[in-house]
Amino acid sequence: MADVRRADPVRIDYKGEGLSEEHVAPTPWQQAQRWVDEAVERSQAQPDVPEPLALSVATVDAAGRPNVRTVLLRFFDERGPGFVTNTESTKGLEIAATGGLAASLTWPAMCRAIRFRGVAQELGRDEVSGYFGSRPWGSRISAWASRQSQPVVGRAALEEAYERYAAQWPDRGRPDDVPVPDFWGGYRVVCDEVEFWGGRRNRLHDRLVFTRVAEGSLDEPTAWALSRRQP
């Protein structure tokens, strides 16, 4: 077995275009939407961006230790990025306890990343219900079958729960075939800071950061100040 402690690290010199003050959009929302759209477009044309909406979400527990996991970006407008989850999961409980939330989108092949930092805002039930009804029937059933983050004795128990709920709410091709669980919802990051990272040669990356200076949405120019940070 190879000794990874002695192995030469894989070094990649990023060859991205970066991001300059002259070319950044006037608001964090416009810049983020531009990059998200370009990542989605690339994913449809090339295999190097297989999951363009993969969103890493970080929370902290009662002891201040961080947790991070990957979900999918399911809501994105000038209010902030949002995702769905079991609200009784580890992430849901930690969000409820602290309110703090950070998330990031990363596209290595494009040498780009966006970092969102702020506080959590629970999604309204209308938003949650509307999205839940758009999910495939099997995904709606699995929302009931999985008590997210809780221990389970084995995969068989999970599959048995799935079959039980599938029999209770069979697929009839309607968005209301499966009711929305009370414990299923979602959150939006109400941002105080949005950072755009663009990889460059020789590790001289671009880091342009929008910092909140006033009330307003992600698309309100007067609510944000732009600055550059060293890489």
Image: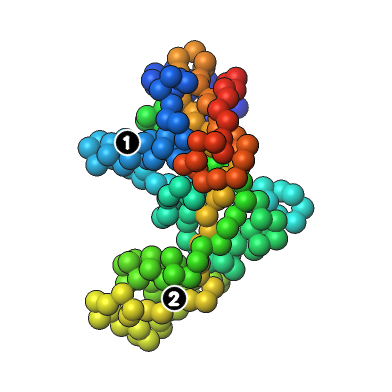
Look at the image and tell me whether residue 120 can be seen. yes
* Image mark for residue 180: 2
Q: Compare residues 12 and 43 and report the one nearer the observer.
A: 43
Q: Compare residues 213 and 33 and report the one nearer the observer.
A: 213
Q: Where does the image place residue 7, in percent across and percent down from the top left?
A: 54, 23
Look at the image and tell me whether residue 49 can be seen. no
Q: Is residue 105 above or below residue 142?
A: above
Q: Where does the image place residue 105, in percent across and percent down from the top left?
A: 46, 41
Q: Secondary structure at mark 2?
A: loop
Q: Where does the image place residue 155, in percent across and percent down from the top left?
A: 47, 69
- Residue contact at pointers 1 and 2, CB within 8 angstroms: no
* Residue 65 placement, left or right of 185: right
Q: Return the residue found at the far right.
A: 63
Q: Which residue is mark 1?
A: 38
Residue name at image x 44 percent, y 23 percent: 19
Q: Is residue 231 above or below residue 174?
A: above
Q: Compare residues 180 and 127 and report the one nearer the observer.
A: 127
* Residue 126 placement, left or right of 150: left
Say which amino acid is labelled 2: Val
Residue name at image x 65 percent, y 51 percent: 100
Say which amino acid is labelled 1: Glu
Classify mark 2: residues with Cα within 10 Å, few (<14), some (14-19) or many (20+).
many
Q: Secondary structure at mark 1?
A: helix
